[in-house]
Image: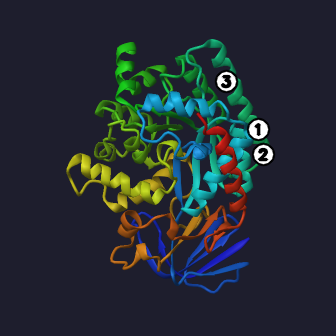
Amino acid sequence: MSILIKNTTVLTQDKNRRILKNTDVLVSENIISKIGKFNEKAEFVIDGRDKILMPGFVNTHTHAAMSLFKGFGDDMELNEWLEKKIWPAEAKLTPEYTYFGSLLSIAEMIKTGTTAFNDMYFFMESVSDAAKKACMRVIVCDAVIDFFDEKKAEITKNRTLKLLTYVTGLNDSLIRAATGSHAIYTCSPESIISQKRIADKNKILMHMHVSETQKEVNDCIKKNKMRPVEYLEKLGVLGENVVFAHACYLSKKEIDIVKKHNVKIAHCPVSNMKLATGGVIDWSYMRSKNVCVSLATDGHSSNNNLDMFKEMKMAALLQKHARMDATVMPAQDTLDMATLGGAQALGINAGRIAVGALADIILLDKKDISLVPQNDIVSNIVYSANGSCVDTTIINGSIVMQNRKLTTLDEDKIKEKCIDIAMTLCTD
């Protein structure tokens, strides 16, 4: 399939962060093949005069099926929230519930401009099926939790291997598998090492929560006489294929270790603030060391939406507020995290509008009130806009939303089904 977007404004996110006016972009199959002014025929032609064309967002840490728990147990202390609300509800999850909860999240992501996401949860075959149905780009991993039990460790290892086989069998370039040790406090060292070996052997990512809370750090120091990243380095599980979610409490020494091993960071500002974890990533030091920092929403239960526009604004504001410095994390750097940083973290040839890059593209409505006037387009996108300004979403060269209408999913049916499921799950 070919798509021609005519006479549009292009945020290239290239090396010079150029913004091109009155420009044409041609998509051939799943690749951006031409950028400039030209006369080409295409199967689909989009008038881009009132649009802003930019790379789609890459959400590097999610739990998609938690859309079913949206608004369930808000404003509670973390442990009470988990023990009294989330864990009992999760115990009722089924593959079918996970499938529809994932579809609901994917629909929301497509409608708010996300073209790829990195998901860790349960029943990940169902998440894979949902992504395939939607033509969505995803990396899936099982939330490996063994609570230091050898039998559970073996079960979770087999579950990971089963998921890898399932994803391979789908034979879909949009769906990739990863390994997923939940955290150092829920996984034995043997299990974490096993997951990393599987990741290395299969040349896939390893995804885990790291240093989300001060308690996690304190407990690790008490138990292992070292901080979490130091502990993981000692286990020999760090590498360029590792993604750390949160990383709120990394010391400068730990950040140096992260850089040494080229580990990627998935920053989740809204989730961290909503759960009152207290930590703020040391973004300035990470940037000075050229650490790959990406942006993520986490799940609905600790965020309540998957809108990366809102995540960008909160990321920038959190840094400015915490550091008492209005110049920290400017708009362009924040946009880079949500596009280029995410693509780099997940190993996707995207995050920029360039010839040869994957056609993961979104078109914004230039006349949306949040984008008017356009004194600074990047500033508007980070500080003013929200997901409702996304008009068209293209993933891998396929139009999955146009004129805010989903083309691969029945939105009304998904919403109705999830309302029914939530009534079953979210009862005390």
- The numbered disc on residue 336 is none
Residues marked 1 and 2 touching at CB (< 8 Å)? yes
Q: Residue shown at 41%/59% (left/top)?
A: 335
- The three-letter amino acid code for the residue at tag 3 is Lys
Whether residue 380 appears in this view of the structure is yes
Pointer 3: what residue? 157
Residue at position x 45%, y 60% in the image: 309
* Residue under numbered circle 1: 166
Q: Is residue 386 left or right of 115 when viewed as pictured?
A: left
Give percent across and percent down for residue 250: 34, 33
Disc on the earlier residue, 2 or 3: 3
Q: Earlier in the sequence, mark 1 or mark 3?
A: 3
Residue nearest the viewer, comparing 105 with 52: 105
17 relative to 239 in the view: left or right: left
Mark 2 — residue? 170
SS under mark 1:
helix
Amino acid type assigned to the residue bearing label 2 in the image: Leu
Q: Is residue 290 left or right of residue 393?
A: left
Residue 339 against residue 269 in the figure, above or below: below
Q: Secondary structure at mark 3?
A: helix
In the image, residue 385 lies at what x, y percent?
43, 67
Crowd around label 3: few <14 · some 14–19 · many ≥20 (10 Å): many
C-alpha separation, residue under disc 1 versus residue under disc 3 = 14 Å
* Residue 299 in view in this figure: no
Q: CA distance from mark 1 to mark 2?
A: 7 Å
Q: Position of residue 387 (x, y in %)?
A: 50, 64
